[in-house]
């Protein structure tokens, strides 16, 4: 496949450029392929109950994750944009990033703040930002080494513990709708417990 074909495929399938995908791939952790292998007996057991390997599934999932991260980066805000939107200094934004009270993704040496964590308010020709309520309590509770895709999954995938009008909601939807922070912090704690 030529570079032009790759560029066209990325635009057609993901509406992303090669540079955007590369930037997102850099956020992913390196893989230790040795730790993912199964013993022969474990593989036979899985085969016997219908779990079969799907060639290319691993690569496909990595591309999907990278595309999701690339979209977060493309639609995110810079330090300056967040500072202007929140009405504070860039220094204050950098401090909040270090304290992990704002969600930021490092992309090509810059910090990008995913737009999903903000509520944009437009008045006339100008706009301002506000952080989704209580997110400044949730983000520091997450493990500090959590990868951007895992943070996105935690915040954006509907959870059965967070129900609004009879349907599961995502953490950001729950909090922006006025839901209490305690059930979200319990989900963080359950995740920490399950991971240990």
Image (cartoon, rainbow, N blue to C red):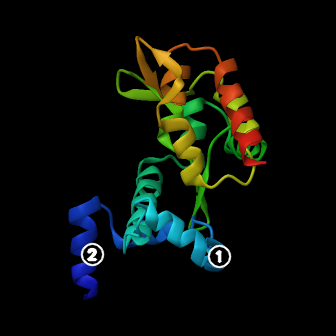
Mark 2 closeness class: few <14, some 14–19, many ≥20 residues within 10 Å: some
Q: To which quarter of the image does residue 133 belong?
A: top right
Image mark count: 2
Quarter-wise, where is residue 189 in the image?
Answer: top right
Residue 63 vertical position relative to residue 79 in the rendered view, above or below: below
Left or right: 193 with respect to 115?
A: right
**Which residue sits at x=28%, y=85%?**
3
**Distance Cα–Cα, label 1 vs label 2:** 28 Å
User: Where on the picture, by quarter, is residue 37?
Assistant: bottom right
Please give the name of the residue rendered at 54% of the width and 50% of the height, measured from the top-left corner.
Answer: 78
Q: Which mark is residue 32?
A: 1
Residue at image location 61% in from the left, 48% down from the top: 104
Q: Residue at x 65, y 39 (%)?
A: 102
Q: Position of residue 96 (x, y in %)?
A: 73, 40
State the residue in front, 97 or 81. Answer: 97
Left or right of residue 3: residue 38: right
**Can residue 161 be seen by looking at this rendering?**
yes
Q: Tell me if I can see residue 92 in this picture.
A: no
The residue tagged 2 is: 7
Point out the tag, 1 or 2, that comes first from the N-terminus. 2
Residue situated furthest bottom in the rendering: 2
Residue 157, horizontal then vertical, whole percent: 47, 37
Placement of 134 over or under 34, stated as above or below: above
The numbered dot on residue 184 is: none
Crowd band around label 1 with a 10 angstrom C-alpha radius: few (<14), some (14–19), many (20+): few
Q: Nearer the viewer, residue 66 or 32?
A: 32
Front-lying residue, 19 or 13:
13
Tell me the element at label 1: loop
* Quarter that holds the N terminus: bottom left
Give the image location of residue 161, x and y in percent: 56, 23
Tell me where residue 77 appears, x and y as whole percent. 50, 46
Of badges 1 and 2, nearer the viewer stands 1
């Amino acid at each position: 496949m030529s570079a032009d074909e790759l560029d066209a495929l990325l635009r057609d399938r993901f509406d992303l450029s090669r540079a955007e995908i590369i930037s997102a791939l850099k956020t992913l952790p390196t893989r230790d392929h040795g730790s993912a292998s199964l013993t022969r007996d474990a593989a036979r057991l899985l085969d016997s109950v219908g779990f079969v390997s799907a060639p290319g599934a691993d690569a496909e999932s990595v591309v999907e994750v990278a595309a999701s991260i690339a979209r977060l980066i493309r639609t995110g805000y810079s330090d300056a944009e967040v500072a202007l939107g929140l009405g504070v200094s860039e220094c204050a934004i950098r401090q909040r990033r270090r304290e992990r009270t704002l969600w930021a993704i490092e992309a090509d040496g810059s910090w990008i703040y995913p737009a999903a964590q903000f509520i944009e308010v437009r008045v006339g020709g100008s706009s301002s930002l506000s952080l989704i309520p209580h997110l400044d309590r949730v983000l520091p509770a997450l493990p500090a080494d959590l990868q951007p895709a895992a943070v996105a999954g935690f915040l954006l995938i509907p959870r059965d513990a967070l129900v609004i009008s009879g349907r599961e909601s995502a953490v950001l939807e729950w909090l922006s709708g006025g839901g209490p922070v305690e059930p979200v912090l319990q989900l963080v704690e359950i995740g920490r417990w399950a991971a240990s």
